[in-house]
Image: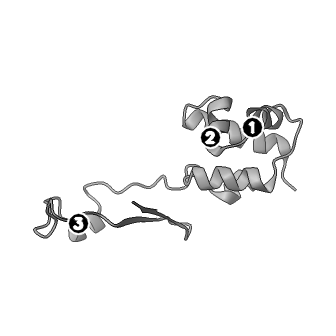
Amino acid sequence: MVNKENFIKRLTQILKYHDLSASTFADKINVQRSSISHLLSGRNNPSLDFVLRVVNVFPEVNLYWLLKGEGSFPANEKKLNSTSPILSKNVSKEKPDDLTESKSIEKIVFFYTDGTFKSFKD
């Protein structure tokens, strides 16, 4: 069972991190604004649907962190910088020769460290 008070603290942390009001957050995850109000006041427990919406809309929110406080927030806090060995060896900062105006991007896929991914297709 989820500890309601701790869940509320973590949900509030997400709102502050993204600088969102409760109503804007509700709109982003497509739930009724009253649902957020009831959760934040402790009146209601979070539903599985609610939790999954948060995790799907905000990929930096780790499911286990949101539910149990295990892990860290944001989950994808580690960012590559110019001194990263991966960047310096594998990524050229110059535009590749084969990437021209005549080509278009078909699909972009982001792979996250928790094993999930998000695909964007035009």
| Local SS, label 3 | loop
Name which residue lies at 61% across and 55% down. 56
Residue 115 spot, x, y in % from top left: 55, 71
Report helix, strand or loop for mark 1.
Answer: loop
Ranked by sequence position, the earlier of labels 2 and 3 is 2
Q: Amino acid at mark 2?
A: Ile
Q: Give the left or right position of residue 109, taking residue 14 as reference.
A: left
Q: Mark on residue 32?
A: 1
* Residue visible at 66% across and 49% down in the picture: 54
Looking at the rendering, which quadrant does residue 70 occupy? bottom right
User: Dot 1, crowdedness within 10 Å: few (<14), some or many (≥20)?
Assistant: few
Q: Earlier in the sequence, mark 1 or mark 2?
A: 2
Question: At label 3, which amino acid type do we have?
Answer: Val
Q: Earlier in the sequence, mark 3 or mark 1?
A: 1
Q: Position of residue 48 (x, y in %)?
A: 79, 56
Identify the disc placed on residue 100.
none
Q: Which residue was labeled with disc 3?
A: 91
Badge 2 density bin: few <14, some 14–19, many ≥20, Cα 10 Å: many
Type of amino acid at the residue the image marks with label 1: Gln
Where is residue 5 shown, x and y percent of the image? 82, 40
Q: Residues within 10 Å of mark 3 (few under 14, many from 20)?
A: few
Of tags 1 and 2, the one toward the viewer is 1
Quadrant into which the N terminus falls: bottom right
**Residue 28 in view in this figure:** yes
Please state which of the two labelled residues, at mark 3 or mark 1, is closer to the viewer.
1
Which residue, given by chain and number where applicable, does mark 2 sit on?
14
**Cα gap from disc 3 to disc 1, whole angstroms:** 43 Å
- Residue 58, position as x, y percentages in the image: 57, 50
Q: Alpha carbon of mark 2 to alpha carbon of mark 3: how far?
A: 32 Å
Colouring: one colour
Viewer-proximal residue among 36 and 4:
36
